[in-house]
Image (cartoon, rainbow, N blue to C red):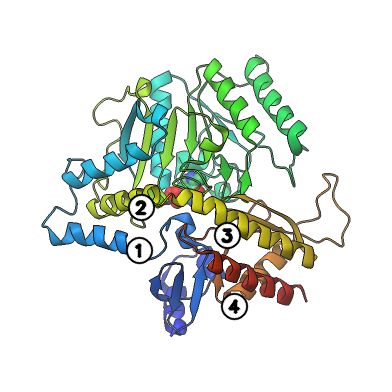
Amino acid sequence: GNGFYLESQQRRESNARSYPRKLPVALTEAAGMKVKDADGNWYFDCLAGAGTLALGHNHPVVIEAIRGVLDTGLPLHTLDLTTPVKEHFVDELFASLPPAFAARAKVQFCGPSGADAVEAALKLVKTATGRRTMLSFHGGYHGMTHGALGLTGNLGPKGAVGPLMSDVHFLPYPYSYRCPFELGGEQGWQVAARYAERMLADPESGIVQPAGMIMEAVQGEGGVIPSPDGWLKEMRAMTAARGIPLIMDEVQAGIGRTGKMFAFEHADIVPDVIVLSKAIGGSLPLAVVVYDESLDVWQPGAHAGTFRGNQMAMAAGAATLKFIRDNRLETHAAAIGERLQEALRRIQADVSCIGEVRGKGLMIGVEIVQSDAEPDRLGAYPARPGLARAIQQACLARGLILELGGRHGSVVRFLPPLIITPEQADEVASRFHDAVRAAEL
Ligand code: PMP
């Protein structure tokens, strides 16, 4: 049962484990959006590999694609040497990119982690511009390697490792509910945009001409914070006018999750660089950086590495991209996401601890707050991370796996597979409702 595996994990794995501590289960079987633990309990998986499992667990087209590689004597791993499987993956990738971007795109295989693709993007824009400074955003998350962590807003994981990248400037990210800079609403994002512009224009701001700007169109780990389209457009216009490459980190929000293939497409912008991982490998490890050909200044060996040739991941990724496009799964994600958000808003009206329900498509966050306290000067109730954790546990007991996030750890995050049905979305909401009621007592 679970006990055997958990005891062994406790004894032998490092203390760096974070979410497994809050979700003490050993998983033995999975299909679609459900997973089974070693005691025979089934769960709805709304963590789904932190958004990796776009088609859920063991989707037939993914399994078939992996089998296709295994059954035909194709090499399993080829470093960066090309193969028919890789050729097919690149076809699918380019067919999924916005046409204006695809027409001028180059791809660099990275990884297999998202963080490695962020490192690649960072090195790329530094090499292309000859500059050193980076612009990043408060609350952003880009991974755990030194460079990626240096671009990450959250100080928690940085504390112990000392100075990272020396020249990163963090700009405010508009957050309507609990913005530390009081930049909520339309007026707020306009102030955030003006602030960024003036910081760049002001010789006294300390910002040397940047090599690039990196951001998430919807912050994920930071607490599911969708950026306003107007603000994103302004950031694009500002960076374009100043010759600063714009890197969109679509590791979590990309590949259909937010209701468009890429989250930046909501704002109708075209970035210079796109960082992709998680769902791009169809549940196996894969990461790429895709960029405008004008940035293609790399010399051979500039971003080498051993594990960029995982053929099963490319086959699974290609099958995932094709299935999403053929079935307009991003449109499905938008519709089901709206249905789930509406259900969560009805729950918000029924309970007293939900401060805000927000998100885009199937990337949804629920802020758990203390509503009988005084709102703070930003008009938001105090965060209640303890209650958020209790709700997460109550969900687990009711067969629902969810993760927390946000600056206080008080945002419950819903990242179900894109194949979730309306009935499953309703069931997820219903279990969450029960869990919130039970935890509130
Ligand atoms: N960027 C974003 C937006 C992410 O959400 C993550 C992972 N949560 C990463 C980068 C890092 O990816 P990985 O964990 O594969 O290194």
Q: Residue at x 18, y 57 (%)?
A: 69
Q: Looking at the picture, which amino acid does disc 2 mark?
A: Phe
Expressed as whole percent of the image width and height from the top left, the position of residue 184 reads 75, 39
Place residue 72 in its image quadrant.
bottom left
Q: Which of the marked residues, 3 or 4, is nearer the chain's N terminus?
A: 4
Which residue has dot 3 on it?
Answer: 414
| Residue 400 in view | yes
Place residue 67 in its image quadrant.
bottom left
Q: Which of the marked residues, 2 or 3, is nearer the chain's N terminus?
A: 2
Label for residue 398? Answer: 4
- Tell which tag, 4 or 2, sits nearer the viewer: 2
Give SS at disc 3: strand
Q: Which of the marked residues, 4 or 2, is nearer the chain's N terminus?
A: 2
Picture mark count: 4
On screen, residue 13 versus residue 380, left or right, reads: left
Q: Which of the marked residues, 1 or 4, is nearer the chain's N terminus?
A: 1
Q: Looking at the picture, which amino acid does disc 4 mark?
A: Arg
Expressed as whole percent of the image width and height from the top left, the position of residue 274 reads 43, 35
Mark 1 surroundings: few (<14), some (14-19) or many (≥20) residues within 10 A: many
Q: Looking at the picture, which amino acid does disc 1 mark?
A: His
What's the CA distance linking mark 1 and mark 2?
Answer: 10 Å
Q: Quick one: which residue is furthest to the left in this view?
A: 73
On screen, residue 206 versus residue 369, left or right, reads: left
